Amino acid sequence: MGQEVLSQIQTKKNPSIELPVRSLSNIYFDPVHRLIRIGDKKSQRQYLNLSHTRKFMQTLLVASECKKIIEQNVTTSIRDLYYALKHTIEGTKENTFDDQSESDPVLEDLESALNLLREELHLKADRKGYMAGPVVIEDTGDRIDCSKMGSSGWAIPSDVEPGMIKFVENKAGFVLVIEKDAVWQRLNEDKFWRTHNCLIITGKGQPARGCRRLINRLHNELKLPVYVIADADPWGYYIYSVIKQGSINLSFLSDRLGTPNARFIGLTVRDVADYAISSNVTIKLNKGDHKRIKEMMNYVWFKPKEWQRELKLMLREGYKLELEALSSKGIRFISEKYLPDKIKRQDFLP
Amino acid sequence: MGQEVLSQIQTKKNPSIELPVRSLSNIYFDPVHRLIRIGDKKSQRQYLNLSHTRKFMQTLLVASECKKIIEQNVTTSIRDLYYALKHTIEGTKENTFDDQSESDPVLEDLESALNLLREELHLKADRKGYMAGPVVIEDTGDRIDCSKMGSSGWAIPSDVEPGMIKFVENKAGFVLVIEKDAVWQRLNEDKFWRTHNCLIITGKGQPARGCRRLINRLHNELKLPVYVIADADPWGYYIYSVIKQGSINLSFLSDRLGTPNARFIGLTVRDVADYAISSNVTIKLNKGDHKRIKEMMNYVWFKPKEWQRELKLMLREGYKLELEALSSKGIRFISEKYLPDKIKRQDFLP
């Protein structure tokens, strides 16, 4: 990219950078790979175009800082990147960046233009999430046995690329992704991963990029089936869909962050009848939920009849429920009855 | 507590529970132990008092559930506790709890009445935060060497009580607590804990209870000095004060969660001049900041002259700054220059 701009300058052309269009008009659902994808539309960011000049300058600044930190073999956070680059341009009162909200999208532009994850540009996103189970990983020379991590589990880092995190040994047969950390802790305390020979992962809500990439790698490299358990509400179902087919915002990374073969275990509204869950622990849908559910029913990836049935049932019953609702049946109901039963019967939503 | 209520019922007295008053009127700063403390005032929660009856019922419900999970030797989350106890009282339309905001304060009442941490009642709070460095801990039978945890560090659990987390071996000479995870990751990547023979801990913002309890134990049991580095802004200074002398809300736990001997490394407004930090990366104080700083100047624990000088300087200069501001001096400035320099000169605020 740098060399191209340089040669444009040397041949006295208007320096310009080609970037994929990241707006909705260029996003589509790829039915073959079952992933949210970015299309072929490109735009030009030109130096000699007043409405582009500032962003052009910012793009080159971020790119050159990435080059610098890669050469120094260090990594940094996107907030540090912003601070490292922020300065007043000599002889002017103009700042290179006024706010981090200017540098973050420029970085996403670069990721999509170069088809590289920010972790490959040595930048770290926020990290959260934990994993436990019979897998041994290697991280910067340290060997970490995820079945010997006590009550904490292994903290999933931001950068889980193969250069950073290696799978050394694995005995697990599948991956269970759990929306909530409290439920993860319940399953870890019951050593669910030992009795069911699996890996348990929580993203603590919407999983961070590192967590989604890890799930993707566990599925693709270790050939492990991936099952997801989340709240029976629009947010829980959305979390599942992002794990499965990626997100609109990061559509250019879907093949690395999405896991199309993931299956949804629950919760579902149907579970309330199937497992005799008390109506006390269901939560009435609010206006926003109704709207969101109707929107979701129109998404291509919620078109399978099983999902349409579930979403319609939710609207008809008028309630949602959280994973903790299962605790009303006893603290270990989820680990001793609900999950084993669902997995045994392969009672999943697609 | 249960037996007392039972004997009150048997002797036909009005069943009642004695609770410490947790409002501001009963909170004070203990200058000897330098901790925020709760006073001696007690209140009675009575069954035969219409304005108490509901809360009395809730208190006994939470207490009995705690007894049950302790006997079963399981732990659970405070959200699960709420769900496990929520039901409609037979023959009425009344729910035991309508919302978790009803069960959480009841639990704090119990903690203070029984002088027990919720972790000792087998309940888990939210967890966050990481630690790395030359210490070996034991967690439910697993031996975890915090100097071999790769890029993640050891994830600090909610329950770090001695029954759960044991310090098996320690070679560190001090503890460095870092407000921000991004800075922690920078120091971990530079193996700051190896070159400076220390433990590095981040609470990811305001540390959770588990993290504060861990700092307290490392200081008291392993006799390690504790240094804190946070943003130079009212929030960063508040985080430091909570680590140091506890919080008003959890005043009944200050002796277990506070570390009065903690010292503040930085950032300070004075650092801007001392380390020639560019004014581009300072942030103008807003109206809320001004108000908050003036409030803080009146807190007993910010009365030492060094803090008064710092807070006055912040008001006069009219700016605050974040840890990332140091990145404008180079990515490794914080680990190679700023921290070693401050620690060597013992240039701390009290």
Image (cartoon, coloured by chain):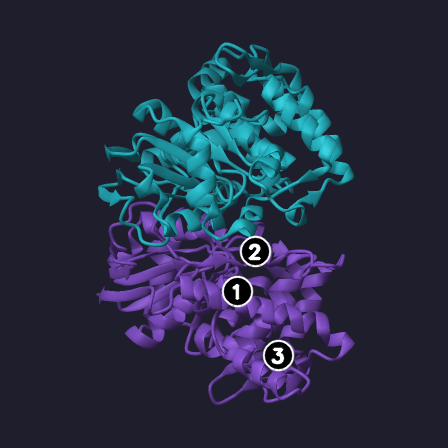
Chain colours: A cyan, B purple
B138 vs A294: above or below: below
Residue at mark 3: B299
A162 in relation to B60, above or below: above
Rendered view: B167 above or below B126: below
Is residue B276 toward the left or the right of residue A51 in the image? left
User: To which residue does mark 2 refer?
Assistant: B84
Disc 3 is attached to a residue of which chain?
Answer: B
**Alpha carbon distance from label 1 to label 2:** 8 Å
Circle 2 residues within 10 Å: few <14, some 14–19, many ≥20: many
Task: Confirm whether circles 2 and 3 share one chain.
Answer: yes
Q: Amino acid at mark 3?
A: Tyr
Amino acid on which disc 1 is placed: Glu
Residue ID at (49%, 61%): B208
Q: Is residue A23 visible?
A: yes
Closer to the N terminus: mark 1 or mark 3? 1
In which quadrant will I find the N terminus of chain A? top left
Give residue A101's position: percent from left, percent from top. 61, 38
Instruction: Pick whichever, B170 or B324, lies toward us.
Output: B170
